[in-house]
C-alpha cells in the first residue's frame, strides 16, 4: 500500500524533472526586487513582468500606498479574527458600500481572498436538491466551492451555449439552478458569450453568477467587466470578483441586488471561519477602486493598446495563442520540454511569464500564460516581442 | 434513440478511451478495467470521455457522481442512469 507521503514524493519527482530540464525553477522564481509594477529582478536578472495579472498596473499606486500606511498606524496590522467574532471595522463596511456602488448593486460581501469568495458563496448558496451548472474551464475556486457544498454539479462544454441549454432542459422542472460563468477565462483568455448564456439561463429558470476576476478593470466602458460589456447588468444575479488583479492587492467580494444574499455571512464558512481583510488592504483596495472609477477608462485604453501590440505579434510569430485578443494571452506549447525551452529563452531575454502545467492543462502539455498591463512601456513591449522572436528562432534551431 | 445496452456503452467507452490516448490503445480494456489504477486516466481525459458519452447518449452526468466511479462497468451504469 502506498505511504501517506507518496503523494508528495510523486509530485516532488515531477517538480525536480521540471527544474532539471529548465536549470532553474519556473514554478518558484525568486523575485528579489520589485522595480515597478511591470519590472523586477528575478534570480539576479532584470525582467519585464508579463505574468502578473496586474492589468491596470496599480500595485504601486501612490494614494493606495499612503492610505494603507495610515491604516496600519491607525488600525494595526490585522483584525485577528472573523467579522462574526471580532466585528466589522468601519473600513469593511465602507469598502462594501464602495464596491456595491461601483457595480450599481445594493449588496456587497467582502471575503478575505477571491478564492474564498467563490468557495464561500457557492458552498453557501446551493444545497441538497439544488443544481450548480458550471463551465468545464472554470477556475479551481469554483470547482472547490461546488465540492464543499451539497448541490448536484453539472458541467457543460466550455463556452458552449447549446450544451448549457441541453443540460438545463434535462434538470427537474422547478428545481433550483445556478449557472456559473467567468468573464475572461484565466488560461486561454477568452470571453464567455454572456448575453446568450444569460438568455438560456433565464429561459430555463436559472440564477446566473459571473466571476469577473480577470475582467474587472479590463472589460466594459467603466471597467465593471463582461456583464457591463454584454449589457446584462440587470439580469445577472451575483457578481464575484477579486482585488488581486486589476485592484492590485488581495481580497474578494460578492455583489448582488438580492437582499437575501446578506445572510450568506452566516452560511459561508470561508467568510465565518477565517480572519477578515486587514485594515491596510481594505484601505488600499478602496483607494484603487476610487481611482478606477475616476481614471479607469484611460487606464483600460492603455491596457488594450498594449494588448494590441503583444497578441498580434505573438500570433504572427506562429505561437499558438488563445482564440481572441484579450490581456490574458495563453500560449500553448506542444510539450513540456518545448514549453521549458521557450520559458527559458524568454527569461534569458529579460521576460517573465507564468508556466502552467497539468492538471491545469492536458497531460504532457504546457501553457505559457502571459498577461499584459496598462503600465507596460513601449520599450518593455519591444523587449517582449524581441524575446518571443528569440524563442521562436531557438525552437527552429532545436527542431 | 433506443435504449442502449450496458454492453454497447462499455464498448463505446473502450473505443473513446483508445482514441483519447494512444497508450490505452495498446492494452486490453474490459468492463472490469479500473480507470484509475489500471490505466491511470487523468482528470482531463475523464472530462473529455464523459463529454463524448453524454453527447452520444444524450445524458448529463453530475460531476459529484464521478468520484464514485472507478471501472468501465461503473461508468457505463452511470451513463444509463443519467439519460
Image: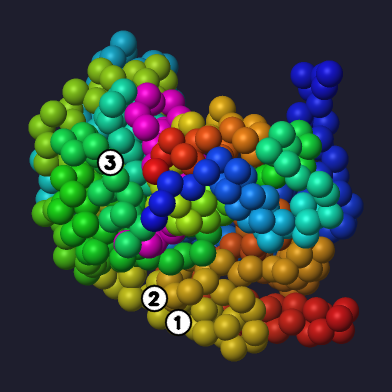
Q: Is residue A308 left or right of residue A292?
A: right
**Magenta span contains residue A152:** yes
**Magenta span contains residue B67:** no
Task: Tell me where residue A136 appears, x and y as whole percent.
Answer: 46, 51
Residue A212 in view (yes/no): no
A223 or A147: which is nearer to us? A147
Mark 1 and mark 2 in contact (Cβ < 8 Å)? yes
Task: Identify the residue at image location x=30%, y=35%.
Answer: A131
- Point out the image quarter for the C terminus of chain B: top left
Q: Could you classify mark 2 by the number of other residues whose Cα lies within 10 Å: few (under 14), some (14-19), or many (20 or more)?
A: many
Q: Which residues are magenta?
A: A136-161
Real-space Cα separation, disc 2 to disc 1, in angstroms: 6 Å
Q: Which residue is mark 3?
A: A171
In the rendered image, which quarter is residue A284 located in? top left
Task: Tell me where residue B37 appears, x and y as whole percent.
Answer: 76, 34
Residue A16 in view (yes/no): yes
Q: Which residue is mark 1?
A: A308
In the rendered image, which quarter is residue A346 located in? bottom right
Mark 2 and mark 3 in contact (Cβ < 8 Å)? no
Task: Identify the residue at image location x=72%, y=69%.
Answer: A334
Q: Which residue is mark 2?
A: A304
Amino acid at each position: 500500500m502506498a505511504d501517506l507521503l507518496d503523494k508528495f514524493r510523486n509530485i516532488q519527482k515531477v517538480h525536480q524533472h521540471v527544474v532539471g530540464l529548465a536549470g532553474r525553477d519556473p514554478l518558484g522564481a525568486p523575485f528579489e526586487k520589485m522595480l515597478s509594477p511591470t519590472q523586477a529582478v528575478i534570480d539576479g536578472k532584470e525582467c519585464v513582468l508579463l505574468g502578473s495579472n496586474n492589468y491596470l498596473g496599480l500595485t504601486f499606486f501612490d494614494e493606495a500606498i499612503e492610505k494603507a500606511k495610515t491604516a496600519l498606524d491607525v488600525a494595526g496590522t490585522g483584525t485577528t479574527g472573523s467579522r462574526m467574532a471580532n466585528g466589522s471595522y468601519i473600513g469593511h463596511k465602507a469598502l462594501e458600500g464602495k464596491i456595491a456602488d461601483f457595480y450599481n448593486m445594493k449588496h456587497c460581501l467582502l471575503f478575505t481572498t477571491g478564492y474564498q469568495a467563490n468557495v464561500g458563496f457557492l458552498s453557501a448558496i446551493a444545497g441538497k436538491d439544488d443544481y450548480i451548472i458550471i463551465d468545464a474551464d472554470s477556475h479551481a475556486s469554483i470547482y472547490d466551492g461546488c465540492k464543499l457544498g451539497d448541490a448536484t454539479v453539472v458541467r457543460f462544454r466550455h463556452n458552449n451555449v447549446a450544451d448549457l441549454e441541453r443540460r438545463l432542459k434535462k434538470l427537474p422542472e422547478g428545481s433550483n439552478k445556478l449557472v456559473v460563468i467567468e468573464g475572461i477565462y484565466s488560461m486561454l483568455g477568452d470571453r464567455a458569450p454572456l448575453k446568450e448564456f444569460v438568455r438560456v439561463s433565464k429561459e430555463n429558470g436559472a440564477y446566473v453568477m459571473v466571476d469577473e476576476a480577470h475582467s474587472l478593470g479590463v472589460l466594459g466602458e467603466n471597467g465593471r467587466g463582461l456583464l457591463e460589456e454584454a449589457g446584462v447588468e440587470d439580469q445577472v444575479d451575483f457578481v464575484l470578483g477579486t482585488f488581486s488583479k486589476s485592484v492590485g492587492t488581495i481580497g474578494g467580494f460578492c455583489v448582488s441586488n438580492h437582499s437575501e444574499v446578506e445572510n450568506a455571512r452566516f452560511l459561508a464558512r470561508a467568510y465565518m471561519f477565517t480572519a477578515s481583510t486587514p485594515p491596510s488592504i481594505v484601505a488600499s483596495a478602496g483607494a484603487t477602486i476610487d481611482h478606477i472609477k475616476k481614471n479607469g477608462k484611460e487606464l483600460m485604453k492603455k491596457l488594450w493598446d498594449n494588448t494590441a501590440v503583444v497578441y498580434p505579434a505573438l500570433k504572427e510569430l506562429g505561437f499558438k495563442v488563445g482564440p481572441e485578443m484579450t490581456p490574458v494571452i495563453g500560449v500553448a506549447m506542444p510539450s513540456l520540454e518545448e514549453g521549458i525551452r521557450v520559458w527559458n529563452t524568454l527569461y534569458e531575454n529579460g521576460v517573465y511569464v507564468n508556466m502552467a502545467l497539468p492538471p491545469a492543462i492536458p497531460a504532457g502539455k504546457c501553457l505559457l500564460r502571459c498577461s499584459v498591463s496598462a503600465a507596460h512601456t513601449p520599450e518593455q513591449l519591444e523587449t517582449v516581442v524581441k524575446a518571443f522572436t528569440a524563442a521562436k528562432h531557438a525552437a527552429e534551431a532545436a527542431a | 434513440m433506443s435504449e442502449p445496452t450496458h454492453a454497447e456503452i462499455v464498448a463505446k467507452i473502450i473505443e473513446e478511451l483508445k482514441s483519447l490516448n494512444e497508450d490505452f490503445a495498446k492494452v486490453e480494456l474490459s468492463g472490469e478495467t479500473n480507470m484509475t489504477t489500471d490505466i491511470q486516466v487523468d482528470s482531463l481525459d475523464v472530462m473529455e470521455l464523459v463529454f463524448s458519452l453524454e453527447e452520444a447518449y444524450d445524458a448529463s452526468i453530475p460531476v459529484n457522481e464521478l468520484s464514485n466511479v472507478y471501472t468501465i462497468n461503473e461508468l457505463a451504469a452511470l451513463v444509463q442512469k443519467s439519460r
